[in-house]
Image (cartoon, rainbow, N blue to C red):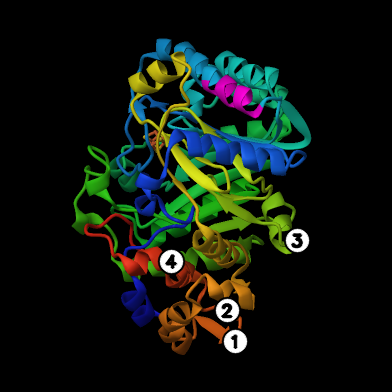
């Protein structure tokens, strides 16, 4: 395994979209084209409903490992104006759609959603629901910070339909916590997890990261033991993405040499995976584990698992609208990203402009490749029909996979590729074989994190 790790540890995308953001064709994109793809998808799937992602960008302090788009501030007076802007942006989309859409999925991410007061979060959701209908089987979820999530947050959001919450744990070791500037006692995680379960949340998730500065295998082992004691329904167990050259002032609180090597990282992953499966968690897609009763695992067994900018999800809609500063939307035929500056965002929406600044419209080749990458990421297998070979150069893809086949990571047959058990940790590398955009033009600088 060590040799494979050394061989395949290269910079690569996590494929929450295809094409990946650095390969969007910005020249072929316009606000007008974006809106027409949104409308097209909405009209083609009138009963399917839509997904909403709402980005709440404020955090009180900076975690040095963080790759999210956020603004560090203690000025809570920013909450209400920001919510008003998000609701204005939502109304711009509702006006475009011409009717109240059915909301199938809604996720609050950040930043720190629980930076906002419970009553403000409730106002936000009530404002969204004035112009949208909550589906009977809607899945509403949010990211809670264990240090500032209160019972009132959990109760207020439960009252407006939230049943899923995810808490960022990362690692319980104090040296690691100091290095990432996130001191977070076990007691805090225990409290919020127990409160959520008492209130009636049906899926509580914990995020654990390996590959953090000063983290060794014993720290990961201890963190997973403590996590299992709280028995969350879902666990995201993923590798720290070290890309300080992309993250401005973030990811600078430690040296490259403070990070575990790729071999240690792989050992951390293998050990963590074994512990989680021994504890009864099922391996779901890349980096995710869930109890057999959790929706994510049920979606895997029913073949309905999907992946989008929010990561893995059990409810697929073709239209996903991202609201808030820096959010990315997916209309199925295209992608668009909102402006990243808070001031510009508020200015644009107050002038009635959907605040996107870049995007991509998918061509036929993109659509086919996206389907295969989604299949690999969600089902570890994909097959194609003869007619697809008229559009996509499958001969090149097979050629890209030959070495991985001889290393036992994939099995190739005429029109099907299956990822083997041994190949699962390398699913990003395997997906890269399909990424013809990446093969045609390698990035000039490092833009992706390492795959291992
Ligand atoms: S990890 Fe979360 S809380 Fe920490 S800075 Fe990033 S977004 Fe904010």
- Kindly state the secondary structure of the residue where label 1 is placed: strand
Which element carries disc 3, helix, strand or loop? helix
Rendered position, 289 above or below 353: below
Position of 355 relative to 23 (above/below): above
Which residue is tagged 2? 417
The magenta segment: 89-97
Location of residue 451 in the rendering, given as x and y in whole percent from the top left corner: 38, 64
Depth order, front residue of 165/326: 326
Q: CA distance from mark 3 to mark 2?
A: 20 Å
The quarter of the picture where the N terminus appears is bottom left
Give how far apart the Cα atoms at labels 1 and 3 are: 24 Å
**Mark 4 residue crowding within 10 angstroms, few (<14) / some (14–19) / many (20+):** many
From mark 2 to mark 4, how far is it between C-alphas? 15 Å
- Name the one closer to the observer, 242 or 309: 309
At label 3, counting other C-alpha atoms closer than 10 Å, the crowd grade (few under 14, some 14-19, many 20 or more) is few
Q: CA distance from mark 1 to mark 4?
A: 19 Å
**Residue 118 drawn at (x, y percent):** 57, 18
- Horizontal and vertical percent for residue 152? 61, 19
Residue 83 versus residue 239 in the image, above or below: above
Q: Quadrant of residue 96?
A: top right
Residue with the mark numbered 4: 435
Image quadrant occupied by the C terminus:
bottom left
Q: CA distance from mark 2 to mark 1?
A: 6 Å
């Amino acid at each position: 395994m060590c040799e494979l790790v050394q061989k395949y540890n290269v910079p690569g995308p996590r494929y929450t979209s295809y094409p990946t953001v650095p390969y969007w064709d910005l020249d072929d994109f316009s606000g007008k084209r974006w809106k027409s793809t949104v409308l097209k998808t909405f009209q083609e799937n009138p009963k399917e409903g839509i997904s909403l992602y709402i980005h709440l960008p404020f955090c009180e302090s900076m975690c040095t490992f963080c790759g999210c788009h956020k603004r560090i501030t203690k000025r809570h007076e920013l909450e209400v104006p920001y919510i008003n802007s998000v609701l204005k942006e939502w109304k711009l989309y509702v006006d475009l759609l011409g009717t109240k859409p059915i909301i199938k999925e809604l996720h609050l991410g950040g930043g720190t959603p629980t930076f906002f007061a419970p009553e403000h979060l409730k106002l936000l959701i009530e404002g969204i629901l004035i112009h949208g209908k909550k589906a009977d089987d809607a899945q509403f979820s949010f990211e809670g910070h264990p240090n500032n999530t209160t019972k009132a947050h959990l109760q207020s959001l439960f009252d407006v339909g939230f049943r899923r919450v995810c808490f960022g744990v990362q690692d319980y070791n104090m040296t690691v916590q100091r290095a990432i500037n996130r001191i977070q006692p076990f007691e805090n995680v225990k409290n919020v997890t127990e409160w959520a379960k008492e209130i009636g949340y049906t899926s509580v998730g914990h995020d654990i990261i390996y590959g953090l500065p000063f983290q060794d295998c014993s720290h990961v082992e201890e963190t997973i033991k403590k996590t299992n004691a709280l028995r969350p329904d879902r666990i995201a167990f993923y590798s720290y993405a070290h890309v300080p050259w992309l993250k401005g002032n973030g990811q600078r609180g430690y040296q490259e040499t403070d990070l575990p090597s790729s071999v240690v990282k792989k050992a951390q992953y293998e050990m963590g995976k074994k512990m989680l499966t021994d504890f009864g968690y099922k391996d779901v897609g890349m980096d995710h584990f869930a109890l057999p009763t959790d929706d994510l695992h049920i979606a895997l067994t029913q073949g309905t698992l999907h992946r989008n900018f929010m990561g893995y999800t059990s409810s697929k809609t073709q239209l996903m609208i991202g609201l808030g500063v820096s959010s990315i939307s997916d209309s199925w035929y295209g992608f668009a990203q909102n402006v990243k500056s808070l001031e510009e965002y508020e200015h644009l929406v107050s002038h009635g402009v959907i605040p996107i600044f870049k995007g991509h419209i998918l061509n036929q080749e993109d659509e086919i490749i996206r389907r295969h990458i989604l299949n690999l990421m969600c089902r570890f297998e994909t097959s194609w029909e003869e007619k697809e070979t008229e559009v996509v150069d499958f001969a090149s893809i097979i050629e890209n996979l030959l070495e991985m086949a001889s290393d036992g990571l994939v099995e190739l047959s005429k029109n099907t590729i299956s990822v083997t058990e041994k190949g699962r940790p390398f699913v990003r590398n395997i997906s890269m074989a399909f990424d013809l955009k990446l093969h045609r033009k390698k990035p000039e600088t490092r833009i992706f994190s390492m795959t291992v």
